Image (spheres, helix red, strand yellow):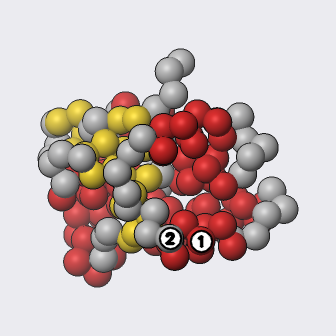
Amino acid sequence: MTVIADTGVLVALIDPDTREHAWACNVARRLSKPFLTSEPVLTEVAFLLARDGLDADELFALADSGAISVGLDFNRARGHLRALMKRYRNVPMSLADATLVRLSELHDECAVFTLDSDFYIYRRHGKRAIPLLMPEA
């Protein structure tokens, strides 16, 4: 199974002060690597870490170790991303979320590793629920 990593989970894996840190680390240990993600997600992670007074060294370390990998090329995916963001304009859908939905469309056997409840709303290929790895409510 391909694991697709969202912003909140990556922040939780790096920042031990997050509420979801222990959960994210426990789940991540059991999953196959690398986790696929996107450059917009990485940008969000770096921004949130900086906001919380942390630098991006651990984010780079995840990539250097092979734990995460960028799995989408914006230039090839932009038509799909535009259509997704237009479809979910009322949510609203971020570019980062659109890239993860697109990754889920490209990898049939996958799950999005996320803390974001908007992924309950999003559909891949227009109608199929996206398999999720989320903490229980």
Count residues near mark 2 (Cα–Cα under 10 Å), then give few for <14, some for 14-19, many for 20+.
few
26 left or right, relative to 88 = right
- Taking the spot 76% from the left edge, 70% from the top edge, the residue there is 55
Q: 57 or 77: which is nearer to us?
A: 57
For the residue pair 6 and 35, the one nearer the viewer reads as 35
Kindly indicate the quadrant of the structure image that contains residue 95: bottom left
**On screen, residue 125 above or below 43:** above
Residue 78 image offset from top left, x and y in percent: 28, 72
Residue 45: quadrant of the picture:
bottom right
Q: Secondary structure at mark 1?
A: helix
Above or below, 102 relative to 74: above
Q: Position of residue 11 (x, y in %)?
A: 63, 53
> Looking at the picture, does residue 59 appear above or below residue 7?
below
- Mark linked to residue 91: none
Q: Badge 2 is on which residue?
A: 65
Mark carried by residue 61: 1
Alpha carbon of mark 1 to alpha carbon of mark 2: how far? Answer: 6 Å
Left or right: 89, with 24 as reference point: left
Decide: marks 1, 2 in contact (CB < 8 A)?
yes
Instruction: Identify residue type, mark 2.
Output: Ser
Residue at disc 2, secondary structure: loop
Image point (42%, 41%), residue name:
30
Q: Position of residue 86 (x, y in %)?
A: 32, 54
Work out whether residue 16 or residue 96 is closer to the camera in this orientation and state it: 16
